[in-house]
Image (cartoon, coloured by chain):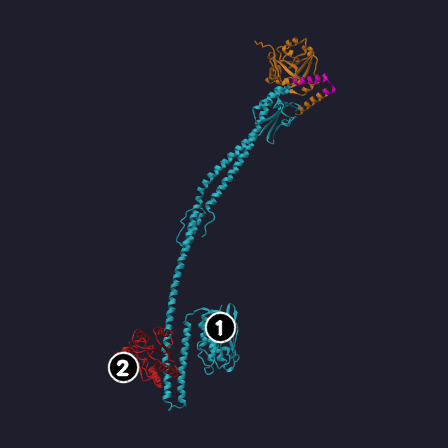
Chain colours: A orange, B red, C cyan
């Protein structure tokens, strides 16, 4: 409970600080990415990775590739948290080769050009790819953040999730818009 | 007019007879005294029966009656007399020693005319007899005798 | 025996009814209370469960800030008319979604409260955390009304009341039937007691059989009756015996009385006659032989006469005395004052040449035989006069004093008095303390007085001294 309270407090502070120190779009943006950071963390709870991709005692990795828009928020959220006994770590990647074990990968908008490349590289690896647009999901990213009606929505490409052998909880699916080509299954 | 009338004395005790007769004699009343010894004799006299069958005269002017007599005693005689039409009106004076209330009551109930107790003292006895005799045999008018004057019946 | 104000039957029935009704009511209360408690618990559990279910469903909505989804999840509550309001709170505890949507903030608090449940007036409020895989993402708040509980309580109470009413009827019937087992023996016994008391028939027995105290009572009662019967018989026998004895005694008395009567009659007649003869013939002799008699001779003859007369007087007195003893007492209220007056008047005739000063104190009215009491006064007054003869003027005081529940009458004279040594002889028959030459008399007067007074239930006594007069007392009960 204390952890929760601390996190809540931090969030509040962050929000307040952010909103007090940066007026206008800057503040909003920070807020947006704080929320996205939270979502990223929550994805870990509503998605199941295959057991062989996450052995015991291995850390649960949330990676960011590209320009990190989260700042400190993601680190703070996951600090001292565990997902089913796996310690949460944040890693920032610059290029693909650096990506080894990673459960969630946030692909920053800056990597827009390399997106297909990235996605095909990660194809069949159990990595939950998260992007910042609807288009991301359409292009076989698994989850895309969408801002609509001042709300942060999720767009999920279920086929991509299935291809990545990831099971997304129906609870999460319910929140989201499901997109993607009809799943091509062999 | 002082005609001597007959007195019938019924007394069983000789001494008492003598005393009574003496007292009557003292007062010149003894002439016409008939003495009977008991109630039966008295009845015979009254009825002109037995020894007195041929006597003359009617009823005595008074009967001096002692109570305690043999055969027929005083009260019995009195009763008979009062029950008999002929003698019902004959004056009877009980002259006796006792003052027993029962005797007095019974006597009056049977219709006695007077009850006199004989005093012990002779002087008084004399006085009593004198009074009796003078009254009953001299002064008093006896009831008319039916036997003597049958036409008046 | 008076009729009872209530009956054992009523008491027993009332007792049983009271017991059963109280017990039923108690049970009813316990049942209803228990039901309320357990139903509340059930309601809480149900609501908590529902909260948890909804919480589980809303983890994602909360995690991903999906208001629509969260609202939709809560909207499922409309299926239950008992739900008043619900709220989902984010991880910061701020209200995120409500049911009904857009519900006024009064229904649901703005901040999530502590986990748990509470009863708020007529509502039940449950607050549970929303957690995904152990990690809290928010909280859920549910408020439900308790109409279900109210209805249930109402039904419970009605059921209990009906049951109690029905049971009262059954209890009444049962107790009416059961009380007989207790009451009947008692009633029977009471009936027996009543009939024994009314008819005084001690041969009745209760013939009761019982294994309880009533049976013991009935047995004891029978024993007691046996005792009473026996005693009663004894008493009757004794009474009968007593009666017989009394009758026998009375017969004896009456026989004795008759004998006495015959005796006195005989005396009256037969004793007097010879005396008369003695006196009579002495007189005649005196007259007859007066010439040949000298003084001495005449004196002798006089003595004989005197003796005969004396004997006659004695006989008269004795007869009177005896008659006084046998005569029936006719008791009535006697005014002693007026009686004394009369006696004094009578005596005045006899003692006309004597000067007598009479002093009377207040004489009350007493209960007695007037003729006999007259005789008492006659005797006492004439004695007083007689024995004051030598004194010239006689002074006689008559007084009466109440003393210890009696009236004591005193007759005091200033006569010659008597020697107190012989006081006890005064009232004896034919007892005299003075010779006939001094005072005439037979000595029977005071004996008569004593006889009469004791027949009235009183006592006689005298005080005096030689030459100082005498006082004669007699008492009569009040």
The residue at the point 58 percent across, 22 percent down is C76
Q: Tell which tag, 2 or 1, sits nearer the viewer.
A: 2
- Up the image or down, C151 lies above or below C334; here it is above
Q: Position of residue C427 (x, y in %)?
A: 46, 75
In the rendered structure, does residue A30 fall within the stretch colored magenta? yes
Q: Are marks 2 and 1 on the same chain?
A: no
Indicate the quadrant where residue A61 lies. top right
Quadrant, the C terminus of chain A? top right
Q: Residues within 10 Å of mark 1 (few under 14, many from 20)?
A: few
Q: Which residue lies most toward the front here?
A: B151
Q: Which residue is mark 1?
A: C338
Q: Measured along the vertical axis of the image, is residue A140 above or below residue C350?
A: above
Chain letter behind tag 2: B
The CA span between labels 2 and 1 is 59 Å
The residue under label 2 is B56
Asked if marks 2 and 1 touch (Cβ < 8 Å), the reply is: no
Note whether residue C380 is visible. no
List x then y, in percent, for residue C186. 44, 47
Front position in the image: B44 or C35: B44
Q: Is residue C177 left or right of residue B79?
A: right
Q: Is residue C416 magenta?
A: no
- Chain letter of disc 1 in the image: C
Dot 1: element? helix
Res A109 quadrant in image: top right
- Label 2 sits on a secondary structure element that is loop
Q: Which residues are magenta?
A: A19-39
Quarter in which the N terminus of chain A is drawn: top right
Rate crowding at label 2 as few (under 14), some (14 to 19) or many (20 or more) other CA atoms within 10 Å: few
The spot of residue C126 in percent (x, y) is 60, 27
Q: Is residue C40 above or below residue C469?
A: above
């Amino acid at each position: 409970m204390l952890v929760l309270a601390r996190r809540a407090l931090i969030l509040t502070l962050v929000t307040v600080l952010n909103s007090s120190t940066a007026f206008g779009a800057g503040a909003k943006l920070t807020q947006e990415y704080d929320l996205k950071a939270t979502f990223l963390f929550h994805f870990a709870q509503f998605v199941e990775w295959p057991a062989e991709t996450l052995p015991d005692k291995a850390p649960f990795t949330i990676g960011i590739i590209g320009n990190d828009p989260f700042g400190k928020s993601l680190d703070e959220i996951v600090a001292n948290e565990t997902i089913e006994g796996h310690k949460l770590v944040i890693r920032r990647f610059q290029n693909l080769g650096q990506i080894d074990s990673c459960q969630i990968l946030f692909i920053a908008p800056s990597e827009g050009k390399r997106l297909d490349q990235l996605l095909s590289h990660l194809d069949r690896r159990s990595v939950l790819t998260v992007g910042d647009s609807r288009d991301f999901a359409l292009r076989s990213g698994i989850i895309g953040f969408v801002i609509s009606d001042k709300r942060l929505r999720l767009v999920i490409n279920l086929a991509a999730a299935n291809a990545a052998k990831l099971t997304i909880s129906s609870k999460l699916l319910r929140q989201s818009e499901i997109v993607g080509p009809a799943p091509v299954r062999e | 007019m002082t005609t001597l009338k007959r007195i019938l004395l019924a007394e069983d005790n000789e001494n008492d007879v003598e005393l009574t007769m003496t007292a009557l004699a003292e007062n010149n009343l003894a002439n016409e005294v008939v003495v009977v010894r008991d109630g039966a004799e008295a009845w015979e006299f009254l009825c002109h029966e037995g020894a007195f069958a041929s006597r003359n005269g009617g009823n005595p002017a008074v009967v001096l009656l002692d109570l305690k007599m043999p055969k027929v005693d005083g009260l019995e005689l009195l009763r008979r007399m009062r029950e008999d039409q002929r003698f019902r009106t004959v004056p009877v004076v009980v002259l006796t020693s006792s003052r027993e209330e029962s005797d007095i009551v019974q006597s009056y109930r049977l219709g006695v005319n007077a009850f006199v107790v004989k005093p012990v003292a002779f002087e008084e006895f004399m006085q009593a007899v004198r009074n009796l005799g003078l009254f009953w045999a001299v002064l008093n008018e006896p009831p008319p005798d039916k036997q003597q004057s049958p036409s008046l019946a | 025996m008076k009729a009872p104000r209530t009956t054992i039957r009523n008491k027993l029935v009332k007792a049983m009814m009271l017991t059963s009704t109280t017990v039923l009511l108690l049970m009813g209360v316990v049942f209803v209370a228990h039901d309320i408690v357990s139903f509340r618990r059930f309601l809480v559990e149900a609501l908590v469960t529902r909260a948890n279910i909804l919480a589980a469903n809303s983890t994602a909505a909360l995690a991903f800030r999906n208001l629509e989804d969260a609202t939709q999840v809560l909207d499922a509550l409309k299926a239950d008319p008992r739900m008043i309001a619900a709220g989902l709170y984010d991880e910061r505890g701020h209200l995120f979604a409500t049911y009904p949507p857009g519900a006024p903030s009064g229904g649901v608090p703005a901040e999530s409260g502590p986990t748990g449940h509470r009863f708020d007036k007529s509502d039940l409020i449950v607050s549970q955390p929303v957690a995904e895989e152990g990690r809290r993402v928010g909280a859920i708040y549910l408020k439900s009304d308790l109409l279900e509980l109210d209805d249930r309580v109402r039904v419970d109470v009605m059921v209990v009341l009906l049951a109690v009413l029905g049971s009262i009827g059954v209890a009444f019937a049962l107790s009416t039937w059961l009380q007989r087992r207790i009451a009947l023996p008692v009633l029977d016994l009471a009936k027996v007691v009543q009939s024994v008391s009314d008819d005084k028939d001690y041969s009745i027995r209760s013939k009761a059989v019982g294994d309880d105290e009533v049976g013991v009572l009935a047995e004891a009662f029978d024993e007691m009756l046996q005792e009473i019967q026996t005693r009663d018989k004894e008493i009757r026998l004794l009474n009968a015996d007593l009666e017989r004895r009394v009758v026998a005694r009375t017969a004896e008395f009456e026989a004795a009385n008759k004998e006495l009567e015959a005796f006195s009659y005989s005396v009256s007649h037969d004793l007097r006659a010879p005396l008369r003869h003695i006196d009579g013939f002495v007189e005649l002799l005196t007259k007859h032989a007066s010439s040949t008699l000298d003084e001495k001779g005449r004196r002798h003859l006089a003595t004989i006469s005197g003796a005969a007369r004396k004997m006659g007087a004695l006989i008269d007195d004795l007869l009177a005395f005896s008659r006084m003893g046998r005569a029936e007492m006719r008791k009535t209220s006697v005014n002693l004052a007026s009686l004394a007056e009369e006696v004094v008047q009578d005596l005045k005739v006899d003692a006309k040449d004597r000067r007598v000063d009479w002093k009377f104190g207040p004489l009350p009215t007493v209960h007695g035989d007037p003729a006999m009491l007259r005789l008492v006064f006659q005797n006492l007054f004439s004695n007083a006069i007689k024995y004051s003869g030598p004194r010239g003027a006689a002074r006689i005081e008559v007084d009466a004093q109440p003393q210890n529940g009696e009236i004591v009458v005193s007759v005091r004279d200033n006569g010659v008095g008597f020697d107190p040594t012989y006081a006890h002889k005064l009232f004896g028959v034919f007892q005299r303390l003075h010779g006939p030459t001094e005072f005439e008399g037979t000595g029977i007067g005071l004996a008569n007085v004593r006889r009469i007074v004791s027949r009235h239930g009183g006592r006689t006594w005298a005080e005096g001294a030689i030459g100082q007069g005498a006082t004669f007392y007699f008492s009569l009960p009040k």
